[in-house]
Image (spheres, rainbow, N blue to C red):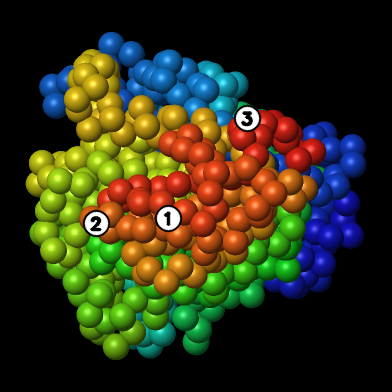
């Protein structure tokens, strides 16, 4: 057991500390060690589809007068998932469900308790019984109300040594910032005023992993989540984890060593659990968290949301295609985590260097026109630049750079159909499945831009909207459920199945080829990104003439491979040679 863990610890800590930590970690996991501890290369297959949601996105009662109604929101969520999505999704990422003080859950007061306003561990375990649970490990910082920070202020153990202090006169201009708030926050302690490191806000105080006791605390937290049924552990904002003066404090070697360590511990406890890193940064930096297939099992495909949005705004595939060609296949045992929307905004840093300057400005302008907000970050030179677009993805796609039009539902469905077909594991933010509009009133109430995409549905209001087939909510959910069910039967959509970018002469078309691991199914995924009909010549796809080909989505047949097929505005096709393939390429059916 110690062969891998101890060398990783020695990369970060002095030898005697690494020795002590190895002993402590083994003592924590010895009763739960997996008999083999071997890497599980069959964690996922084409069947896996995840949902991302807050614990109180759906509530039983009027959120304005009776926030938590008659039942705990987690119980309401469980019922909704079991009623509407049991046969659609396989996993659920419940965003931080712990007691918190700010940032909608990401300033945690207690990692080991469920926020009583949401429900209980029984509610979490109920969801984990029916769906594969993803739990957040908010690893970079804690709430200023956490007991560790109270101990710091009173110079008490253990918390007094858990945080990073710095002299405000130091030159910290190199440090990468995700916000425009001050990096250092003054705090009154029994030892006088101290300035603590606060990457994200004054209420979110960074912990100091240079202290080995902090590492042990977080190993205990990970093990508690595993015991509660988590099958995915998400390392939030992990790129900021380690700080070293004189550096940009981003993606440092010590941070990568910590990710490797957590992966190693999880493999020893349960090789079926996946570690996912959340690093909303330029593409090359994000890819580094695969390591040498020894760090994260999954990384967020952060470049996808802004590039896909821009492609649909412009009606052209060139930047999206260029990016796709530059993306290496995920290493064996690793996968991309594909998403188009999340509880945060659409990150713009991952698009740096990928979009032309004029298109970048046009995209920002269009999002403002569609009701979106733009959040800024500080650069080392003191200037500010867009960090993310805050908007409901459904409303982000209500038009193009030319303005609003009648194609909102079709354009939105096109975006989700593309995501479903890409190499990797697809994940839907719940407000995408529900076609939720901008929550502008919420922004006015909270003063936070991100609230625009965090609407709380009243259960009765939502059920009524979904029962009316004329609403966009019903149209989108019904069609996405149909597409997801089709997708989950296709072995060519295995997260690690072959993917090749295709090059139709028409830039309004975005096309790529997927092939199953066993090479017996091909799917040509072709999408019209424009508001005009477009011609697809089947001969351009080089379809094998001895196979029969048809579209999985429309069920259209293609007996003549020299024919031209007209794609309606924003229409997608999944052209395959194998109808509704349901065997599993020797992979498990459900993770």
> What residue sits right under mark 2 in the picture?
532
Q: Is residue 380 left or right of residue 120?
A: left
Q: How many labels were placed on the picture?
A: 3
Tell me how far mark 1 sits from mark 2, CA to CA.
16 Å
Disc 2, SS: loop
Please indicate, yes or no, whether residue 450 appears anywhere in the rendered image.
Answer: no
Quick check: 121 left or right of 464? right
Q: Is residue 518 left or right of residue 143?
A: right
Mark 1 crowd level (few <14, some 14–19, many ≥20, 10 Å Cα): some
How crowded pointer 3 is (Cα within 10 Å; few <14, some 14-19, many 20+) is rated as many
Q: Which x, y percent locates residue 374?
A: 20, 63
Q: Earlier in the sequence, mark 1 or mark 2?
A: 2
Residue tagged 3: 229
Specify the quadrant that holds the C terminus: top right
Q: Are marks 3 and 1 in contact (CB under 8 Å)?
A: no
Q: Cα distance, mark 3 to mark 1?
A: 51 Å
Residue name at image x 22 percent, y 32 percent? 472
Q: Residue at x 52, y 64 (%)?
A: 540
Q: Is residue 353 above or below residue 6?
A: below
Q: Which residue is mark 1?
A: 564
Q: Position of residue 298 (x, y in %)?
A: 61, 54
Q: Are marks 2 and 3 in contact (CB under 8 Å)?
A: no
Residue 173 pos. (x, y %) = 36, 85
Labels 3 and 1: the sequence-earlier one:
3
Mark 2 and mark 3 lie on one chain; the one further toward the N terminus is: 3
Instruction: Determine which quarter of the picture holds residue 129.
Output: top right
4 vs 536, nearest the viewer? 536
Residue 467 placement, left or right of 540: left
Q: Answer few, some or many: residues within 10 Å of disc 2's Cα (few below 14, many 20 plus, some between 14 and 19).
A: few
């Amino acid at each position: 057991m110690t062969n891998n863990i101890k060398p990783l610890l020695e990369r970060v800590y002095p030898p005697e500390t690494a020795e002590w930590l190895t002993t402590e970690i083994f003592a924590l996991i010895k009763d739960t060690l997996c008999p083999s501890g071997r890497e599980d290369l069959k964690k996922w297959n084409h069947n896996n589809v995840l949902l991302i949601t807050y614990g109180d996105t759906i509530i039983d009662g009027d959120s304005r007068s009776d926030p938590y109604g008659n039942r705990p929101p987690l119980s309401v969520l469980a019922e909704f998932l079991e009623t509407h999505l049991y046969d659609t999704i396989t996993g659920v990422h419940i965003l931080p469900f712990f007691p918190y003080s700010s940032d909608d859950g990401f300033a945690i007061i207690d990692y080991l308790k469920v926020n009583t306003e949401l429900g209980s561990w029984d509610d979490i375990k109920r969801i984990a019984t029916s769906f594969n649970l993803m739990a957040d490990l908010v690893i970079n910082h804690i709430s200023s109300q956490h007991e560790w920070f109270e101990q710091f202020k009173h110079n008490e153990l253990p918390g007094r040594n858990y945080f990073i202090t710095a002299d405000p006169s130091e030159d910290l201009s190199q440090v990468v910032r995700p916000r425009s708030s001050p990096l250092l926050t003054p705090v009154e302690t029994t030892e006088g005023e101290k300035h603590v490191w606060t990457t994200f806000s004054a209420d979110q105080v960074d912990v100091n992993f240079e202290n080995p006791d902090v590492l042990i605390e977080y190993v205990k937290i990970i093990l508690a989540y595993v015991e509660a049924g988590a099958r995915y552990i998400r390392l939030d904002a992990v790129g900021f984890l380690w700080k070293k003066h004189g550096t940009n404090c981003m993606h440092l070697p010590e941070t990568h060593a910590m990710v490797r360590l957590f992966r190693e511990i999880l493999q020893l406890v349960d090789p079926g659990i996946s570690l996912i890193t959340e690093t909303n940064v330029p593409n090359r930096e994000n890819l580094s968290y695969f390591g040498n297939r020894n760090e994260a099992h999954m990384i967020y495909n952060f470049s996808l949301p802004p590039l896909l949005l821009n492609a649909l705004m412009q009606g052209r595939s060139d930047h999206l295609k260029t990016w796709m060609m530059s993306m290496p296949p995920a290493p064996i045992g690793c996968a991309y985590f594909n998403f188009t929307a999340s509880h945060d905004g659409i990150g713009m840093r991952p698009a740096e260097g990928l979009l032309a300057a004029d298109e970048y400005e046009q995209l920002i302008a269009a999002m403002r026109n569609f009701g979106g907000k733009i959040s800024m970050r500080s650069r080392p030179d003191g200037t500010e630049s867009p960090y993310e677009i805050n908007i409901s993805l459904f409303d982000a796609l209500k038009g193009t750079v030319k303005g609003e039009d009648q194609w909102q539902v079709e354009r939105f469905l096109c975006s989700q159909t593309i995501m479903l077909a890409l190499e990797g594991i697809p994940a839907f933010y719940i407000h995408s499945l529900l076609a939720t509009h901008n929550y502008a009133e919420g922004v006015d109430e909270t003063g936070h831009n991100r609230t625009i995409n965090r609407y709380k549905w009243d259960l009765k209001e939502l059920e009524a909207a979904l029962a009316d087939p004329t609403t966009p909510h019903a149209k989108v959910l019904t069609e996405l459920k149909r597409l997801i069910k089709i997708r989950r039967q296709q072995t060519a959509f295995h997260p690690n199945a072959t993917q090749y970018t295709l090059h139709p002469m028409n830039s309004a078309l975005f096309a790529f080829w997927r092939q199953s691991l066993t090479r017996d199914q091909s799917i040509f995924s072709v999408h019209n990104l424009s508001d005009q009909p477009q011609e697809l010549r089947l001969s351009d796809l080089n379809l094998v003439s001895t196979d029969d080909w048809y579209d999985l989505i429309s069920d259209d047949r293609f007996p003549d491979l020299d024919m031209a097929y007209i794609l309606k505005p924003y229409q997608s096709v999944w052209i395959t040679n194998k109808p509704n393939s349901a065997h599993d390429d020797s992979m498990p059916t459900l993770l």
